[in-house]
Amino acid sequence: MVLLLPDGEPHSHRRPSALSHARLLPLARALAHAGRADGLTAHVVRYRCRGWNEDDAHLAADAEWAVDEAVRRYGDVPLCLAGHGMGARAALRAGGHPAVGAVLAMAPWLPGDPSADPEPVKHLVGRPVLLVHGTNDSRCAPDLSFRLAERAKKANRDTCRFEVHSDGHALRQHRTEVAALAADFVRGTLFGHAYARPVTDALAAPPPLGLRMPLAVGFGESLGVG
């Protein structure tokens, strides 16, 4: 199972954004299609509100609730948390849940205040972690996700990061390649399928090579993901 976590906002108690939820539905369908032979299902999580809200970390709490609910409903199934933007931060924060087997963070929103406590990474040990970020993301600084990946790699060798050249926060320009990369990672981590060569190389390469792996145009065409 993949639980997809939509984007959110740093501070807000408003109702969750229907648009952010809808933007992940095509990826959910693409993942379910790519993993249909393995019985993969994908669900987009609905938050209580759209804000992270500082120490309350509402989106991460909702992600953990969703994992608990998945375990209650489906039992001990392989599970990946995948998020976009603020949802990617929630996936990384909740990724230490015992039922989570892998974490996919797309264009993660991370705090840029150097005086703030860094995002935790040691709880991710023991599960593969993939970060994906567009080099032209003007909302969530790509350099911040690189720094987090650098720290995560020191604690957890199963960490890699792909850069999507010239793409922005929504990763819309190369959405087919991003969906294929996500499908390859999920099928590999949850079901033991062989990764595509770029993913294998990124996981094996030392920093910074494995944390600045370019996502090639046409990646995953043979998977039929789109």
Image (spheres, grey):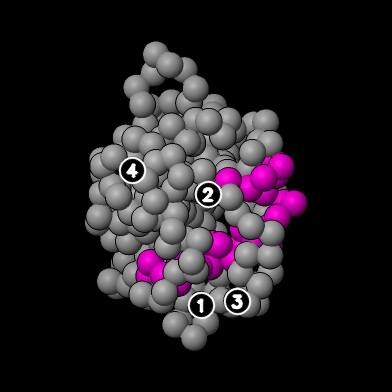
Q: Is residue 51 above or below residue 70?
A: above
- Magenta span contains residue 83: no
Residue 213: image tag: 2
The CA distance from mark 2 to mark 1 is: 24 Å
Contact between marks 2 and 3 (CB within 8 A): the answer is no
What residue is shown with label 3? Answer: 223
Residue placed most toward the observer, 145 or 78? 145
Under tag 4, what secondary structure?
A: helix
Residue 203: image tag: none
User: Which percent across, then down, holds residue 152?
Assistant: 34, 40
What residue is shown with label 4? Answer: 153
User: Which percent across, then down, holds residue 43?
Assistant: 52, 64
Q: Which residues are magenta?
A: 162-190
Q: Residue furthest top?
A: 115
Characterize the local packing of mark 1: few (<14), some (14-19) or many (20 or more) Cα atoms within 10 angstroms. many
Q: Nearer the viewer, mark 1 or mark 3?
A: 3
The CA distance from mark 4 to mark 2 is: 14 Å
Q: Amino acid at mark 1?
A: Gly
